[in-house]
Image: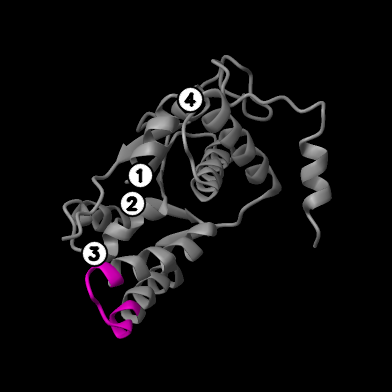
Amino acid sequence: MNFWPKIHQLTGKNSRRKLCTARAPVLPGQDSSQGLKETSKEVSVRIYFFDTSALQHRYLNAADSCGVRRIVSDERVLCYIADWTIVEMASTLARRCRQLSFSHQKFDRLESRFFGVIASGRLKVRTTSTRDFTRARDLLRCAGIVKKRRLSSGDALIAASCLDLAYQEKQRITFCTSDNPLHSILSDITAFTSALHLKFFRPPIVP
C-alpha cells in the first residue's frame, strides 16, 4: 500500500503546525475546555510507552533496570512500544554487546527475550500511522529549526506515536525515556507535556 500520497495530503499548504504553539491540539470530538483523564478515579488502566533508550534497561544490569522490569511485568498496567523500536532495539543491543564484549550468542539470547515479551502480550507494538509521520515531521521542524536542538528522526517518530496514542485513548500516558535531549525537547513543548507524563530513567553506564 502506498501511503505517501496520503502524507502529501496531510502536509499540504492548508495544514497547520501546532506542536510549537502554546496551546495543545484538541482531541477529535472534544471541547477545548476538556482535559485528558489523569486521576486514578478517571483512568482504569495506566498506560506506559517506552522508547528504545528506556526499554534497553530491561535487558541490561543498569541503575534503573529494576524499575523498568517492574513496570513491564506489572499486569495492572499496559505497556506499549512503537514498531520502530523493534529495529532500534536490535541496534541498541548490538552496540551494548560490542561495548561489553558479549558474544553473538549473548546478543541472540537478549533479542529472544525481547521478542518473548512481545509475544506474551506484555509489550504491545503500535503500528506507525501516516499521522505519526506528519507529527514527527512537525516535531523535527520545531526542535531543529524553531528551538535549534538536535533530534533524530527515530526519536521523533516514537514520540509522535506515543502522543497519538494519548489522543486515541483520551488519557495522559507515561512516556519513558533515557534520552536526555529527547526528554529536554519534549519537556519544552506544550503539546507533549499536556498529554504525557515524561518519566526519565538514567542512561546505563557502560564501563
Which mark identifies residue 179? 1
Tell me how far mark 2 sits from mark 1, CA to CA.
Answer: 8 Å
Compare marks 2 and 1 and give the one earlier in the sequence: 2
Query: Can you say which quadrant of the picture contains the N terminus?
Result: bottom right
Tell me how far mark 2 sits from mark 3, CA to CA.
Answer: 11 Å
Residue 55, image quadrant: bottom left
Residue 21 is situated, as x and y percent measured from the top left of the image, at 58, 18
Proximity of marks 2 and 1: CB atoms separated by less than 8 Å: yes
- Residue appearing at x 62%, y 53% in the figure: 128
Secondary structure beneath disc 2?
Answer: helix
Q: Which residue is mark 4?
A: 189
Query: Can you say which quadrant of the picture contains the C terminus?
Result: bottom left
Q: Which residue is mark 2?
A: 54
Compared across the picture, whether 3 is left or right of 153 comes to right
Where 146 sits versus 59, above or below? above
| Visible residue check, residue 93 | yes
Type of amino acid at the residue the image marks with label 1: Asp
Which mark identifies residue 164? none
Residue 111 is situated, as x and y percent measured from the top left of the image, at 38, 74
Q: Nearer the viewer, residue 173 or 86?
A: 86
